[in-house]
Image (cartoon, rainbow, N blue to C red):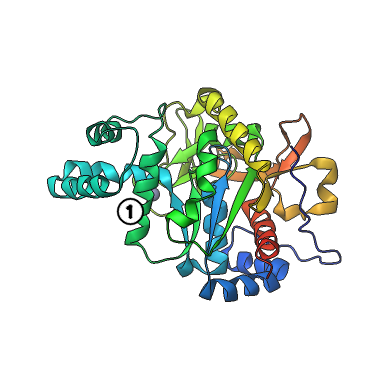
Amino acid sequence: MRFPIFKTKIEGLNRKFNLLDPKEQKEYFQLKAGKEIEKLRNFLRENTFVAYLLGKKNSGKGTYSKMFAEVILPERIDHFSIGDMVRAIDPELKDEKKKKELIDYLDKNYRGRFSLKEIISALKNRNTKTLLPTELILVLFKREMEKREKKTLFIDGFPRELDQVGFSLFFRDLIGHREDQDIFILIDVPESVIDQRIKWRRICPICQISRNLKLLPTPKVGFDEEKKEFFLVCEKCGVKMEKKEGDELGVEPIRERLKLDGKLIEESFSLYGIPKILLRNSIPIKEAKKFVDDYEITPEYYFEWNEKEKKVIVKERPWVLIDDEGIESFSLLPQPVVVSLIKQMVDVLNL
Ligand SMILES: [Zn+2]
């Protein structure tokens, strides 16, 4: 399975953008996809579509779809995560009144292989290893949709396994998006990128925002002189960001999961009848000049400690990684990937 390289470079255009700056990011999108953004905006004011995000864990599904929404029309587009939906049920189960409402709803709408008692117990005792029954996910999703106003949806976390792929083809009927176009968005990210995203991930203990010491630092970086360690300072809360236990192992603990995710993507690739958008995160170094601008490539950040001035010096250099086929590559920043998403979306919707 090959994901094509998408060209975001415009010949003869020499302007550079700092994509971390929101104002420059806006200008960047206008310049690279202004026409397409306008078309999508006009379309989405009156219409909706349903898109399924299929990518390995930590492949950036949330990042891409949220950025798409933000650039196009945030109030008409929702990123919907099945994982978040299931987690939101925990407090409901603890509240007697809400628990009863949930059970009543399931009683009326759930059809499947398990009794209500088994279903509630599966919800209460779920873990990351076992999956909830598909029929349950579908009915919870339907309930969630009934509570919301109809919007364009980016669905994250469904289908999650091979035998759920078939269900997704009838999903839009189930949730009352019958006339909508449904689309699969397949995301290809090398495992070495996922590995580094996990290994260097830092999380704010207060607001839970997640950044990366090597790939996405905060503006303020500190140095622990005792431990000889650099750390990120949360931009919003001003506290030291921390690493989560086990993150230093990178992809090691989730290898099996990544393999399954990979199979799922491959399976979806060969489905007929549903249009596919292919997003690619990496680009072979020797192709990079032809297809993308330098500022669209993810740099690697590193730090030096100036003992005399007690100051951290932040430096960056191009980040070279080995992709899943063993090719020396660069990783793209989210913005050029979203440009390719926007342009492919316009094609799929025939705008
Ligand atoms: Zn914070």
Describe residue 47's horizontal placement relative to residue 233 as left or right.
right
Give the residue type that dot 1 points to: Arg
User: Which residue is at a point 13% across and 49% down the rendered structure image?
Assistant: 97
Q: Is residue 217 above or below residue 26?
A: above
| Residue sitting farthest toward the left | 96
Res. 204 image quadrant = top left
Q: Nearer the viewer, residue 201 or 95?
A: 95
- The answer to whether one can see residue 238 in this image is no
Number of numbered tags placed on the structure image = 1
Q: Which residue is mark 1?
A: 143
Percent position of residue 63, x then y: 54, 51
Of the 4 image quadrants, the one containing the C terminus is: bottom right
Percent position of residue 286, x then y: 85, 42
Percent position of residue 128, x then y: 40, 30
> How many residues crowd around disc 1 within 10 Å: few (fewer than 14), some, or many (20 or more)?
some
Q: Nearer the viewer, residue 278 or 319?
A: 278
Describe residue 148's horizontal placement relative to residue 165 as left or right.
left
Of the 4 image quadrants, the one containing the N terminus is: top right
Q: Nearer the viewer, residue 255 or 116?
A: 116
Q: Is residue 326 above or below residue 305?
A: above
Percent position of residue 310, x then y: 51, 42
User: The residue tagged with tag 1: helix, strand or loop?
Assistant: helix
Q: Nearer the viewer, residue 17 or 265?
A: 265
